Image: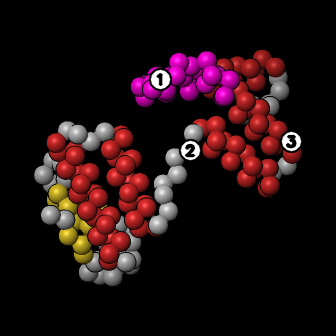
Amino acid sequence: MPSLTKDSRARSPYWICCYTSSTGQRLKKSTKQRDRKKAWEVCLAIERAEGHAKNGTLTEQTAKKIIGEIVERTTGEPLHNYKIRDWLAHWLDMKEQVRASKTTARYRQVIRDFAERCSRLPQFHHRREQDRAHGQSFREGCKRRVQCSGKTTLY
């Protein structure tokens, strides 16, 4: 069963969660919450995630669900789950307000290149190693294009 404590030397204003990890080790982690009730919610969720890890049932989807529940209970807002295209469009809108037009044009080109490369990928989940390899080949392709053209329009 987890417990909450405060720093005995008053170095932190946050509540600290004391819990047992999936390996049986006792750990302490800051909840980053000043309110005890919210801190308790975070602490229970940490313990629940550790329980899933101990049973071997902790998946990425389960972890996202647990984190989403924590965020919603403590802040009152749901965890945003953007699709890449939507997030990049949102990010570009924000940058257009504070950057020069030539800078946002370069950003827009990089986003177009990225979206074009992604559209050629199969529509299934990749393993992380495949994602890293794809990112590396994309960066190398961009570097070659910049070096060959003599222009510094990308990176």
* Residue that numbered label 1 is attached to: 124
Marks 2 and 3: in contact by CB < 8 Å?
Answer: no
Q: Quadrant of residue 53?
A: top left
Q: Residue at x 68, y 23 (%)?
A: 116
Cα separation between marks 1 and 2: 17 Å
Q: Amino acid at mark 3?
A: Lys
Q: Amino acid at mark 1?
A: Phe
Task: Tell me: 133 left or right of 36.
Answer: right
Q: Which of the labelled discs sits on residue 82, or is there none?
A: 2
Q: Is residue 36 above or below residue 97?
A: below
Q: Magenta stretch: dominant SS?
A: helix
Image quadrant containing the N terminus: bottom left
Q: Mark 1: few, some, or many residues within 10 Å (few <14, many ≥20)?
A: few
Q: Residue at x 35, y 66 (%)?
A: 31
Q: Which residues are magenta?
A: 114-137
Q: Earlier in the sequence, mark 3 or mark 2?
A: 2
Q: Earlier in the sequence, mark 1 or mark 3?
A: 3
Q: Which of the labelled discs sits on residue 102, or is there none?
A: 3
Judging from the image, what secondary structure is the residue with disc 2 in? loop
Cα separation between marks 1 and 3: 35 Å
Location of residue 19 in the rendering, given as x and y in whole percent from the top left corner: 20, 61
Q: Amino acid at mark 2?
A: Tyr
Q: Mark 3: few, some, or many residues within 10 Å (few <14, many ≥20)?
A: few
Pair 3/2: label in front: 2
Q: Which of the labelled discs sits on residue 150, or is there none?
A: none
Q: Is residue 5 above or below residue 149?
A: below
Task: Tell me: 89 left or right of 71.
Answer: right
Location of residue 118 in the rendering, given as x and y in whole percent from the top left corner: 61, 24
Q: Residue at x 41, y 54 (%)?
A: 68
